[in-house]
Amino acid sequence: MSAELIARLAVIVPIGLLSGLLAGAFGIGGGIVSVPLVKHLVGVSAHVAIGTTLAVILPTSLMGAYTYLKSKKLIVSLALICGIPAIVGTIFGSHYSHAIEGKHLMVALAALMMLVGLDFVSGLGNKLKAQGGAEGEEFEFKMDTKSLMTGIIIGIVVGLLSGLLGIGGGFIMVPAFCYLLRLPLKVAFGTSLVVIAVVSLPGTIVHAMHQHVDLGIAAQMLAGSVPGAWLGSKFSLRTKDQTLRSIFGSILIVLSIVFAWRELG
């Protein structure tokens, strides 16, 4: 193994590991971290960084989702109900992204993420205490008409925002699942991962058709992201819900500041 390859692996594998840890632990794709890191540290174009990361997100999310599924912390039916509309929303949002002024929308989204993050960290309003199923208890999700429609709306909104603004859906889905469907946090994490995997598939295919997927980089990232997703999901399943809420809320707060700074700056 050449020194150049070793040096390359030393950069790419940790990026994959970090992405996988975020995916498994918090039900997010990890692209918001891995895309800029791949672009700047590996030295590829933005299109290749996005396409390659999308290709990695699919198996990474499925690995994390499988761990949640084994622990009965995942609702497959809800994930599919959200995933299909999310695909449609992503395609529609991507098509009209250049025709819509996204600056004000991103700032508004950043403000919402800030409020949600503060609530996750502090528990203000005790909104999460109304979740169905307390920590450590079995949770049974009832798929009625209201839940069905809510899931479809969540999927459409997540897809639209992802397509319009190019942001990951997990940061929107997890709070939406908790607040609107009253899912326990770990169930929200696991279900979000399946939706992310479903939504990433068409994007990966499109980028591959445009030769924006570097299979070499993808394989090296997967060497870190797949075990990272397994470790992250194990960490989440063994950690108290309040601790996870605090960490996830802190991530939302930091990201809201980054989004607002990038748009307003």
Image: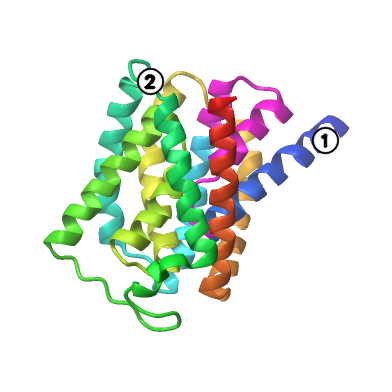
Q: Is 94 situated left or right of 222 in this image?
A: left
At which x and y percent is residue 112? 43, 46
- Residue drawn 18% across and 66% down? 143
Q: Residue furthest right?
A: 3
Pointer 1 residue = 7
Q: Quadrant of the N terminus?
A: top right
Q: Residue furthest left?
A: 145
Q: Is residue 240 shown above or below 42?
A: below
Question: Nearest the camera: 166 or 222?
Answer: 166
- Residue drawn 83% across and 35% down? 7
Query: Does any portion of residue 69 appear in the rendered image?
Result: no
Q: Is residue 265 magenta?
A: no
Q: Is residue 160 shown above or below 151?
A: above
At which x and y percent is residue 198? 36, 45
Alpha carbon of mark 1 to alpha carbon of mark 2: how far? 41 Å
Residue range highlighted in magenta: 26-52
